[in-house]
Image (tube, helix red, strand yellow):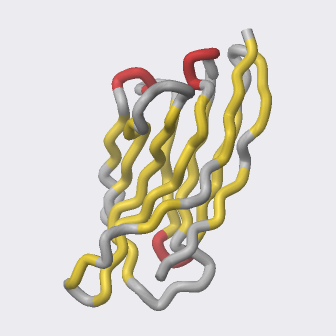
Amino acid sequence: QVQLVESGGGLVQTGESLRLSCEAPKTIFTIRGMGWYRQAPGKQRELVAHITETGVTTYADSVKGRFTISRDSAKHAVWLEMNSLKPEDTAIYYCHAETYSGSMSLGGAWGPGTLVTVSS
């Protein structure tokens, strides 16, 4: 089992910034890709940003140019820098880690979620 610890959510106004953090402080397993997902009320969970173990990043079209994902693989940590926030960014944000034991996938791990609220 890999436990992910998230922090950094909160209430901000339109145009402001937030930085989300996620870390797996105690794991003996390998973590490859890491990502951030979000789920707004009444909507399905969607991918926001993903970063591979080699640092290749992918973003949802809705956040390109505003959000930046980064990681420290040695610390099993990933961050999401969110700038120019909009009310439509309001959601619960979840960290995800692709977990492996050797070459065997363990199915991934999810953080508990952190709420981001952007007021207009």
Q: Nearer the viewer, residue 109 or 28?
A: 109
Check the image and report above or below for 68 versus 110.
above
Apparent side of residue 61 relative to residue 40 in the rendered image (left or right)? left
Apparent side of residue 77 relative to residue 5 in the rendered image (left or right)? left
Residue at 61 percent of width and 16 percent of height: 86
Apparent side of residue 84 relative to residue 67 in the rendered image (left or right)? right
Q: Position of residue 8 (x, y in %)?
A: 73, 47
Residue at 25 percent of width and 77 percent of height: 105
Check the image and report above or below for 2 versus 86.
below
Q: Position of residue 107 (x, y in %)?
A: 31, 70
Q: Quadrant of the C terminus?
A: top right
Tell me which corner region of the image, top left, top right, bottom left or bottom right, holds residue 81: top right
Residue found at the very far front of the displayed protein = 42
Tell me which corner region of the image, top left, top right, bottom left or bottom right, holds residue 7: bottom right
Q: Nearer the viewer, residue 29 or 84?
A: 29
Q: Position of residue 91 (x, y in %)?
A: 59, 32
Residue at 79 percent of width and 30 percent of height: 11
Residue found at the very far left of the displayed protein = 103
Q: Nearer the viewer, residue 72 or 43?
A: 43
Apparent side of residue 98 relative to residue 28 in the rendered image (left or right)? left
